[in-house]
Amino acid sequence: MTNSDQIVVSPVSGARQLALFIRLPRLLYSNLPSYVPPLDMEQKNMLHPKRSRFFDHGKACYFLAWRNGKPIGRISAQVDSLALEQDGPRTGFFGALDALDTQCVKPLLDAAETWLRSQGIERIRGPWTLNPHGESGTMIEGQMEAPMIGTGWHPETLGPAIEQAGFAKAMDLLSYSMEVSPVAEQANSVPANLRQRLGAVKIRGLRKKHIAEDADILRDIYNDAWAGTWGNIPITQAEVQSLLASLKPVLKPEQYVLVEFNGEPVAIALVVPNIFDISGDLGGAPSPLGWIKLGSRILTHDFQSARVILLGVKKKLAGTALSAIVPALLIDELMKRGHTLPYRTIELGWVLETNTGIRNLIERIVPHPYKRHRMYEKTLSS
């Protein structure tokens, strides 16, 4: 390799480089037939320090890899104060790792490690963009499947390159595509009179006049349900309210599924329509006409698929008959909502490979995951 061909990794500096960092994946992958670019606007909301609620409790440093003056890869390194409150090694994270030329993967990871060491971090884990409530993991399987909102896409070469850089697998996150159909409803096998027999169970949707209150209920149940599980970091009130506010143009009451028992909220599922259904043919930066088309499609809710992004059952139900019934009720309700919403498929995603209870429930309906994302980690030497 000549000096002119050397890879240079440097921190992102200035608004122009930040904009390049945000749109770089679609520049790198645009010629790959299986890649569909997300909207730059969506990525900006997730990564820009002035827009992402992550920066209320975290900090990050972004890096670009260059060769011959051209950007060939990117990575983020971030520290989350909420994660540092948890027991165990002081853990920091990497994310937004994208590269087609795998020779830049190790230099990018080295840069992230160096920055995290300067922050007193003992273990690096990722990719998370920028925390578990954003895009998670490196895509290992499913590159040829249809794209889904909030789900990162990576070439098959990226995972092996991370391992070659000295990282070990920490956890796989599985995604299942569930058809909304009578066959799937039958496979879920919830007795028709179950709700009547339970008596005190009530299921309702989102109250648009009380979005802030319903956001707090969602956050309370989700944080309680997943406290202490692998990789969990609590979601904040600002993050949930920002999420619902950003989804307001496409969010319908039926997409929020709340289960109450004796008047107390005990389980929640939030389903979001798949923006790729209406934006996939417009590119990451639509033309003025493209934006008009997108607006029209949003107004007519011209979606065919959706994704469950937040789901949880309160721990107080553990050991009770309801603990086994409520997840099945949530899925049953999602299917029933599919009768009034246009979705043909609903993705159940980010299921930990070790969560056998949820996996067994889902795999009665969908035997195999259709996408797999992998988390990696590495202990940092002092």
Image (cartoon, rainbow, N blue to C red):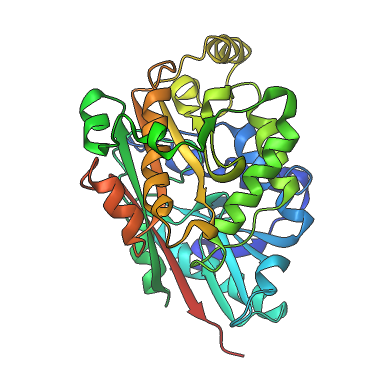
Residue 27 placement (x, y as % from top left): 51, 39
The one of 101 and 294 positioned closer to us in this rendering:
294
Compared with residue 166, is residue 296 higher up or lower down, i.e. above or below? above
Location of residue 263 by image quarter: top right
Residue in the picture at 65% in, 51% down: 220
Q: Which quadrant: the C terminus?
A: bottom right
The one of 28 and 67 positioned closer to us in this rendering:
28
Residue 375 placement (x, y as % from top left): 43, 64
On screen, residue 70 versus residue 207, left or right, reads: left
Q: Which quadrant: the N terminus?
A: bottom left
Residue in the picture at 69% in, 62% down: 61
Location of residue 338 by image quarter: top left
Residue in the picture at 63% in, 13% down: 288
Residue 7 placement (x, y as % from top left): 53, 64
The one of 314 and 278 positioned closer to us in this rendering:
314
Is any atom of residue 188 visible in this view?
Answer: yes
Is any atom of residue 66 visible in this view?
Answer: no
Location of residue 291 by image quarter: top right
The one of 135 and 158 positioned closer to us in this rendering:
135
Residue 232 placement (x, y as % from top left): 55, 63
Compared with residue 138, is residue 44 higher up or lower down, i.e. above or below? above
Compared with residue 352, is residue 39 higher up or lower down, i.e. above or below? above
- Which residue extends farthest bottom? 382
